[in-house]
Each structure stands twice: as C-alpha cells, then as structure tokens.
Image: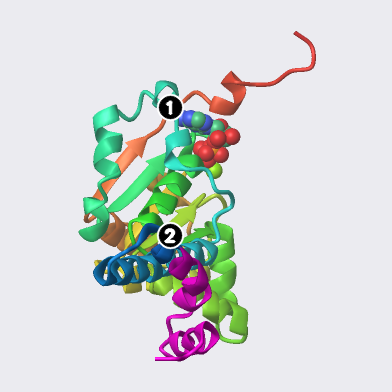
Amino acid sequence: MSKSVTEIQQAFKQLRLSETAEELPELLRKAEQASWTYLEFLEQLTTYELNRREEKSIERRLNWARFPFYKPITMFDLDEQTAITERQLKQLREYQWLEQAYNLILLGPPGAGKTLLSVGLGIEAIQKGFQVSFVTMGELIQLLKTEEFTNKSRTQLKRIRSSDLVIIDDVMYVAMDEREATLFFQLIHQLYEQSSLILTSNRSPEEWTELVDNQGIMTAILDRLLHRVEVIHMNNESYRLKHQKTIFN
Ligand code: ADP
Ligand code: MG
C-alpha cells in the first residue's frame, strides 16, 4: 500500500489508461478536497478516461475526414434556404439515413451552400460516432488513378472505403473519360449499401451522363446511387452574391 503516485501512474500507463495516468494527481487532489467515497472516486476516474478517449477519437476522425473547413451545422442558416424546411434539417440531423445507408444528393448553382451543408452534416456525424471522409471529385479521381503506385493514395482510399459517410464534392464538375468513369463506378459499387454518400453538384444527374464517353457506365453508377436517395435542390440564388461585400456602395 505504499506505492508512490508516480508508480501508480506508471501502472495505469501499462494498463493503457494513459489519460487517467496523467490526470491522477489532479483526481486525487479533488477526491481529498471533496471527500469522495471510494465509489465516487472510481466513478470519476472511469468517466474521465472514457470521456477523454471519446474526445480523442472525435479529434482523430475529424483529422481523417479532411474537411476543407470546420463550420458546424448550426452555421447553416435556414432563412437563407427555401429548399430545406426546419423539419427536414432536423430529420437529417437525426442520422437515421446514415444508419440505413441512404444517399444524399445536393444540387444547386455555385454559392448555394452545398459544401457548407455537407461539411456541417459530416462534422456532426463524426460527433455522433460515425467515420466520415470528405473528398472533391477531382481529388477522388486522382486518388483512384494513382492508387496502384502511391502509398498515400492507397491510405486515403482505405479510409474512404471504410467510412460510414463519404462526401464527394463537386461531382461531374468536368467530363470523365472511360477509365475514370470505370474507376469511379468500382468505388461506388464497393460503397453501395455499406456507406452513405453525400454528393454535391451544380449539374443534374441527367447531365452527368452526358459528361462521360461511355454512358452505360454512368447509367450503372446512377442506378446504384439513386436506389436509396434523397435529392435536395438548393436555392437558385447564390448566398455569396446575395451577401456580396463591395467596396463601393
Ligand atoms: P456551394 O458549395 O453550393 O458552391 P458553399 O457551401 O461554398 O456553396 O457556400 C458559399 C458561401 O455562402 C460560403 O461562404 C457559405 O458559408 C455561405 N452560405 C451558403 N449558404 C448558406 C446558408 N444557408 N447559411 C449560411 N451561410 C451560407
Ligand atoms: Mg461547393
């Protein structure tokens, strides 16, 4: 019974409770100060370790996701959007669609808020325990094309394939050749019914077909994507233009 605090901290580390190990002196101080019972002390200690692990897990998954920015969903202003009602946004934020591997397609012109909404939902999904990846279509095609010979691409694609939610931003921004379309099809096929996708685009799915040489491949991609899907047509008015900051007024 005469082990020093440092020795007990070491033991906690060996038990892979490193967060508690670090916090132990502080926890002991609080316990004495507030005269915690043995049970209260154990409860505080386990709760601390679990909370810290959760926080670190969220941090790690946020880093993995590779979001272009960290704006929470609360920054998405519904007054600026007639395309989505409060009830619909609430339903999206319950993430049942994610558990059931539904896809979301956000369509609308540049500045409509597609990326903002997708990032907001992605961040919140991570906080709810899901694994999320964000990638632009351009980056994704590049990753797929270099997967065979670049470790970095392989690692990133592994994360994408293991995600519960994959956000692909700016789908069909540019045309795809047959090889690119085939690679994209293979990925969609792998993710099909296992993960949810959020796709954003300023072109409608009908137009996507026109942007590939082999239209059959795009038909097959759409067949999978549109099987379980919610398509949201975002405002035609650009938020950027409406809130344009000018020098002269
Ligand atoms: P898109 O991806 O459709 O081109 P963005 O998501 O990049 O549009 O949005 C463009 C800009 O307008 C961003 O600065 C974004 O934060 C802002 N914005 C768009 N829609 C909203 C909204 N509903 N509420 C708050 N900000 C918005
Ligand atoms: Mg965008």
Q: Position of residue 7 (x, y in %)?
A: 51, 89
- The answer to whether 3 appears left or right of 151 in the picture is left
- The answer to whether 24 appears left or right of 35 in the picture is right
Give the farthest residue toward the right: 248
Q: Secondary structure at mark 1?
A: loop
Residue 36: name its quadrant. Answer: bottom left
Magenta span of residues: 1-29
Location of the C terminus by quadrant is top right
70 inside magenta stretch: no
Query: Vertical placement of 174 versus 183: above or below?
Result: above
Return the residue nearer the eye: 176 or 60: 60
Q: Residue 33 shows which numbered tag?
A: 2
Q: Position of residue 236 (x, y in %)?
A: 46, 26
How many residues crowd mark 2 within 10 Å: few (<14), some (14–19), many (20+)? few
Query: Vertical placement of 44 versus 149: above or below?
Result: above
Location of the N terminus by quadrant is bottom left
Count of numbered badges drawn on the protein:
2
Name the residue: 47% across, 86% down.
8
Q: Amino acid at mark 1?
A: Asn
Name the residue: 61% across, 23% down.
241
Whether ligand 1 has any atom under 8 Å from the Cβ at mark 1 is answered as yes
Give the farthest residue toward the top: 249
Q: From where the camera sits, is residue 132 visible?
A: no
Q: Which residue is mark 1?
A: 235
Return the residue nearer the eye: 12 or 54: 12
Q: From where the camera sits, is residue 136 visible?
A: yes
Q: Secondary structure at mark 2?
A: helix
Separation of residues labelled 2 and 1 (CA atoms): 57 Å
Q: Position of residue 24 (x, y in %)?
A: 47, 73
- Magenta segment main secondary structure: helix
